[in-house]
Image (cartoon, helix red, strand yellow):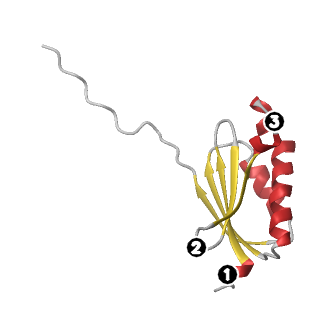
Amino acid sequence: MKHNNQKSVRLIILFTSNNILYSVTNIEGITLFWTSVGTKRIKGTKKLTLITIMSSVKLILHFIWQLKIKYIYLELKGLNKNKKTFLRYFKQLPINVLTINNDSLFGHNGCKKSKLRRI
């Protein structure tokens, strides 16, 4: 399933604890457009509300529709409670999402360290 490079892009979304970063790149990885929730001049915990996230998604979709892009590869990184609502909103759009890649690194504290021996 090979698509035309002009009609497909990668949308990379990085969920951090204080902000959400969006970047639209072509297939080779060259950044075409980027934005974040913080560029709307919203401070603090108000950045992570559903209304501010959807307003920044609408800004990205406006850019994507200007380029007449039909196919998107989604890459989600980080942990956030709004990730599922973001996916539900994105599935309703007329743009074809080809793949959804979730790179959530979540450490479980690893192996137990050996006890220090004291003499």
Q: Mark 1 points at which residue?
A: 5
Q: Which of marks 3 and 2 is nearer the N terminus?
A: 2
**103 left or right, relative to 46:** left
Residue 78 visible in the current orientation: yes
Front-most of residues 81 and 23:
23
Residue 104 location in percent, x, y? 57, 50
Are the residues tagged 1 and 2 within 8 Å (C-beta)? yes
**46 left or right, relative to 22:** right
The amino acid at mark 1 is: Asn
C-alpha gap between disc 3 and disc 2: 32 Å
Q: Name the residue under label 2.
A: 28
The amino acid at mark 2 is: Glu
Please identify the quarter of the rendering in which residue 92 is found: bottom right
Question: In the rendering, which numbered label is found on residue 42?
Answer: 3
C-alpha gap between disc 3 and disc 1: 35 Å
Q: Residue at x 84, y 43 (%)?
A: 52
Callout 3 environment at 10 Å: few (<14), some (14 to 19), or many (20+)? few
Q: Earlier in the sequence, mark 1 or mark 2?
A: 1
Are the residues tagged 3 and 2 within 8 Å (C-beta)? no
Front-most of residues 27 and 71:
27
Q: Earlier in the sequence, mark 3 or mark 1?
A: 1
- Vertical arrangement, residue 1 with respect to residue 63, above or below: below
Q: In which quarter of the image is the N terminus?
A: bottom right
**Number of numbered markers:** 3
Callout 1 environment at 10 Å: few (<14), some (14 to 19), or many (20+)? few
**77 left or right, relative to 57:** left
Question: In the rendering, which numbered label is found on residue 107?
Answer: none
Please identify the quarter of the rendering in which residue 80 is found: top right
The amino acid at mark 3 is: Ile
Callout 2 environment at 10 Å: few (<14), some (14 to 19), or many (20+)? few
> Which element carries disc 3, helix, strand or loop?
loop
